[in-house]
């Protein structure tokens, strides 16, 4: 697929986000994702709330919570919910079998909790995110700081190569106070197995591999919308 310029990519993100918001119904508890595509959905939801849509939301990151409140959306504590009606989030990569890599923005853990609680977990993307096999995008792994070296070495044992995520030359710290190792495993033959191996390492909070958590992916390509489910 030809590379998208920024304007085309934005247009595709917007089209996918607007399509997903149409699934939100009055009275829903809505999970709000993190990242540039999810932000477009949050902005649209904010407009609808101003027009009278009655929803409550749960946020997958501190920045999403601030954004939702800015748009007048009532936000509940994600940790107190046992179920979410619908969630809308982005992805860094996805396959037609609805396996994802997420966490490019560092929000993977709360996003995974949100997706797990969601009855209808919708992913919105532009066409650059669709891949045959996951793995060109490195797998974010959220790590308790104390276990950093151990987890780093275990990732090597699993055949990967880790890099500690930095932001502005400082170690990136997640909303949960942890580090992220971005792990390169090359193209991944068995994402479910890799996810489970990573999650079994002591000190790993979770990996950015999302397996079996997605109801549908709405992808925009040019002027067309494609729904994978
Ligand atoms: O941690 C961030 C999330 O997983 C995002 O949903 C993902 O990185 C995609 O972000 P964007 O919509 O900005 O490409």
Image: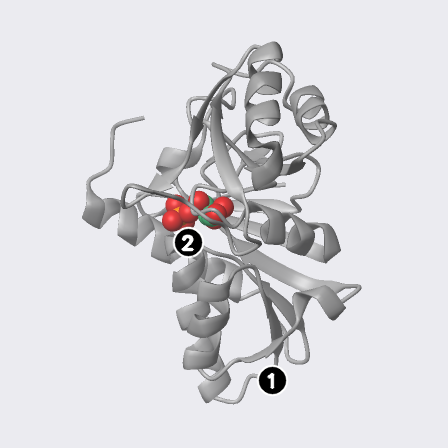
Indicate left or right for 175 with 216 as reference.
left
Tell me the tag on residue 54. Answer: 1
Mark-to-mark CA distance, 2 and 1: 24 Å
Percent from the top left, x then y, of residue 162?
Answer: 47, 22
From the top left corner, tell me how far across and down residue 126 is, in percent.
38, 43
**Residue bearing mark 2:** 35
| Element at label 2 | loop
| Rendered residue at 56%/30% (across/down) | 96
Locate residue 66, reporting x and y percent.
Answer: 45, 73
Q: Secondary structure at mark 1?
A: loop
Q: Residue at x 45, y 31 (%)?
A: 130
Query: Quick one: 218 or 145, which is closer to the camera?
Result: 145
Is 199 rendered above or below residue 123?
above
Left or right of 77 in this view: 124 = left
Residue 195, disc? none
Q: In the displayed structure, does residue 123 sit left or right of residue 210?
A: left
Whether label 2 lies within 8 Å of ligand 1 gets the answer: yes
The residue nearer to you, when weighing 15 against 187, is 187
| Residue 183, placed above or below residue 74 | above
């Amino acid at each position: 697929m030809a590379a998208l310029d920024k304007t085309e990519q934005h247009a595709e993100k917007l089209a996918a986000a607007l399509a997903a918001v149409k699934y939100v119904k009055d009275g829903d508890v809505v999970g709000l994702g993190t990242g540039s595509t999810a932000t477009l959905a949050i902005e649209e939801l904010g407009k609808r709330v101003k027009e009278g849509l009655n929803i409550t939301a749960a946020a997958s990151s501190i920045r999403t919570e601030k954004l939702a409140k800015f748009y007048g959306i009532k936000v509940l504590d994600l940790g107190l919910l046992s179920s979410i009606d619908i969630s809308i989030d982005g992805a860094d990569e996805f396959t037609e079998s609805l396996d994802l890599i997420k966490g490019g923005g560092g929000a993977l853990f709360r996003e995974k909790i949100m997706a797990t609680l969601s009855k209808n977990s919708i992913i919105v993307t532009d066409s650059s995110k669709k891949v045959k096999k996951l793995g060109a995008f490195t797998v974010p792994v959220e790590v308790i700081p104390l276990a950093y070296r151990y987890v780093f070495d275990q990732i090597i044992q699993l055949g990967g190569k880790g890099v500690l995520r930095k932001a502005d030359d400082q170690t990136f710290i997640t909303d949960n106070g942890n580090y992220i190792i971005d792990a390169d495993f090359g193209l991944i033959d068995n994402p479910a197995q890799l996810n489970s191996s990573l999650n079994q390492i002591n000190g790993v909070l979770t990996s950015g591999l999302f397996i079996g958590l997605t109801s549908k992916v709405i992808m925009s390509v040019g002027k067309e919308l494609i729904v994978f489910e």
